[in-house]
Amino acid sequence: MNSGHGTLLTLAGFFGVLSLFAIGGGNSAVPEMHRFAVDVQHWLSDRQFADSFALAQLTPGPNIIIVTLIGYHVAGVAGALITTLAMCGPPAVFAFFVGTASDRFKGKTWHSVLSRALVPVTIGLTAASATIVAATAGYNWMALAITLGTALVAYFVRVHPLWMFALAAVIGMSGLL
Amino acid sequence: MSAPSPTPSSAQPPASTSPASATAPQQPPSLAELFVAFATISLSGFGGVLAWSRRMMVEERKWLTPEQFNETYAVCAFLPGGNILNFSVILGARFRGAPGAVAAAAGLMGPPLCLVLIIAGIYAHYGDLPALRRALTGIAAAAAGLMIATVAKMARPLFQNRAVTRPLIALATFAAIGILQWPLPLVLAVIVPVSLALAWVRL
């Protein structure tokens, strides 16, 4: 843990810019967080990144809360607060001005074009996030089986994610991972 | 796990169809009411905050009609950042201006922020316990699986017509970010304009 002002500035700058590229929600930005925090800055190990992702999934509220854990890991409570503010502030300001203005141009055309253009990008980004999380989680055959099993169950059955997490945690703790 | 879709398919509470829910509120909610509403939404939602926000806004508090909810949410999905954060800001601003936006966003982010700090403190102390480590690995593996299911659900409509450009855009994005691990801003700077242009000419 280091809490130098340089580190806090780096956190604020990186997550502030990243926040504006998070198309379709927080999970789209997970690969970029991993690239920067693990590969470029070496703030976290792969294992710690995967743990942060898992802990964020266990916390109620928006998934974007993973950035709070990364910030805490890098620079304690100050890091957590600055990172969260950097990730939420710019989109919030953007939404405040654009969102209130867009009440005036409620058209179908822009919506349909944006949807056709951005949905495929979001799908690609979410698939990339799944890959990065899987690759960092320290994979063996059992972990792969959990991933594929969860994917199949969640696709075909409506089940609360917490049940899946509980089952996966028990399988993990029982020493099969 | 939020998708830019105005009609989310997963974990949505049953939509109210009673005519009573189609009336807009007479009196806009206060700052405290906005804070409490979004704090409640935030704390009830694991992975599916959207479903809870719909239940609260449309069915319980009746602050929005179903149509208003869909329209507002559609705007949020195409703004950068978390959809539900954008939703809280836009709704707070609509009812109470800038203070309303702050109250709603603080309600949404404040409680999970406190919770996750406690969790982070516990992890800092016990994160190296083998049993906890293995449990977290299992959860990360399951979370990756949930995302794959989300991707599959979102991708299904893409393959229902013959056009190949949209699946190709999705595949190119995935390859650039997930396999080649190129920087996100760089990839989006290329792929978003291309995708917008293709969508504009309706390829």
Image (tube, coloured by chain):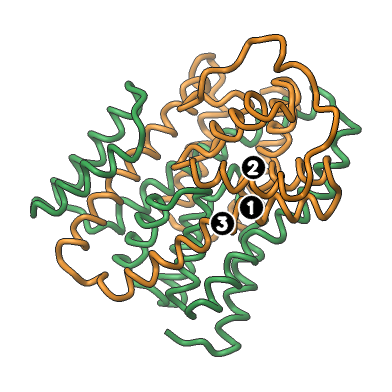
Chain colours: A green, B orange
Where does the image place residue B64, in percent across and percent down from the top left? 74, 27
Where does the image place residue B170, in percent across and percent down from the top left? 51, 36
Q: Chain of mark 3?
A: B
Where does the image place residue A150, in percent across and percent down from the top left? 27, 35
Given residues A47 and B114, the one toward you in this image is B114
Q: Callout 1: helix, strand or loop?
A: helix
| Residue type indicated by callout 3 | Leu
| Residue type indicated by callout 1 | Gly
Q: Is residue B94 left or right of residue B178?
A: right
Question: Which comes before the other along the chain, label 3 or label 2?
Answer: 2
Q: Callout 2: helix, strand or loop?
A: helix
For the residues bearing labels 1 and 2, Cβ distance under 8 angstroms: yes
Residue holding disc 3: B184
Residue holding disc 2: B37
- Give the Cα distance between marks 1 and 2: 7 Å
Given residues B179 and A166, the one toward you in this image is A166
